[in-house]
Amino acid sequence: MNGDSDRDVMTRHILFINEFFHPDICASAAVLTDRLPRIAKLRPDFKITVITGNRAWDNPSVVYPKMEEYGGIRIVRTKRPVVSRRSLFQRGMGFLGFQRNAIRSARRLDPVDLVIGTTAPPNGGKITRTIAQHHRCPYVYTVLDLYPDSAAALNTISASSFLYKRWLKLDTEVMRDAACVVAIAGTVTDRIAQTRNIAMEKLVTIHDGFDPARIEVGERNSFREQHNPKDKFVVQYAGNMGLSHPFEIIMSACRALAGREDILFQFIGDGPRRTYIQTQLPRNGRLIDYQPADRLGEVLETADLCLISQHAEMYDKALPFKIYGILAASKPAIFIGSHRSEIAAWLKAHHAGVHVEPEDKKKLLRHIRGLKEDANEVRLMGASGRKLLDDRLHSQTAAEKWVAVLDRLLQ
């Protein structure tokens, strides 16, 4: 066998770094759980390892095994401190603890050919570069949320502060040293090119994607039986209740419709804004804890109309993952955010929902009332959304795009 053929069949060791992975239910874990086994099937000559934290995202008291395999992927779990998602300070301490332990774990691995890290945690780019330097290999920087830009947009730090400028300088250096920078939205890619002066040929956009098989529901929906026994029209917000998600406009609509006995608002999840929701909740609203991953299909099937919210300034810094599950579940969506977001463009172009600016309370109320009275439109929007996912945003599509990137970098 000649030398070129030897290289063709050579096993390449690819290391992924992410704070969470299977069986966690948070967005970054769900994406990799869908994607990596697909990559492994497409390229059985890849040896794929994931370094992740050992504590469950939704319940830090749950500690996962140190070593495990899933879908052909080797999982190495490193110690992660117990932190509260509602405390930014504690989360920061958790990020630093994960950084230290992930780097130690990576140094004990077999030689690595390529390292792929993410912004989960926010200092993930620095972790990735450090590990790649140790293994003397290239790395890919995957941008899920663009930092420090998103932190400044949410006023958690000032764009004029020393911390912001230092963070931006480091992030830019990490991107310039990377073999490739992958962003989850075209708007994020464009912002990186403009603010970091990164060459476009180094930038790639790959949307997260979603596997509809994750939300298949059996004959009985126990979540619906428990949380909507009277079969009301359900307006549902499910997911992270974080600082990037405005709830004032949603609560305004909820209060305005408090007299409607046939409409129920469900708020499902946790995060820094949960306390606000709890204190503002009128009698037609229900606050529900995060549900296990295997119940996601039941949760989405219970909804008649799904809400997605994002602060307007975040349109080119992140893309809410919940859109994919909503499309997969054939549910219409109302996106509350900037018209410049890709989600707003998707919903309009494919008639899969509607867009509302964060300050337009009357428009949101009008759409909720209108869709409540038009079951046919609800069905049409849901079907159009599912077609969009199947045609363009399936996790298999994302996996194939990732394989093309990996092949190019490993040649």
Image (cartoon, rainbow, N blue to C red):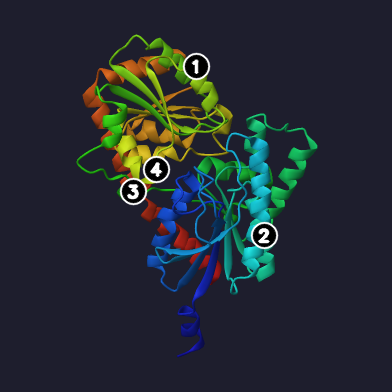
**Upstream in sequence: badge 3 or badge 1:** 3
**Upstream in sequence: badge 4 or badge 3:** 3
Gap in angstroms between the C-alphas marked 3 and 1: 33 Å
Gap in angstroms between the C-alphas marked 1 and 2: 44 Å
Looking at this view, is 30 or 59 the one in front?
59
The mark closer to the camera, 3 or 1, is: 1
Question: What kind of element bears circle 2?
Answer: helix
The mark closer to the camera, 4 or 3, is: 4
For residue 280, the mark is 1
Residue 270 in picture, x, y percent from top left: 50, 33
**Upstream in sequence: badge 2 or badge 3:** 2
Name the amino acid type tagged 2.
Answer: Arg
* The furthest residue to the right: 162
Residue 370 in picture, x, y percent from top left: 30, 17
Q: In this rendering, would 285 be left or right of 319?
A: left
* The furthest residue to the left: 219
Q: Which residue is mark 4?
A: 292
Q: Which residue is mark 2?
A: 129
Gap in angstroms between the C-alphas marked 2 and 4: 34 Å
Cβ atoms at labels 3 and 1 below 8 Å apart: no
What residue is shown at x 63% (from left), y 59% (from top)? 102
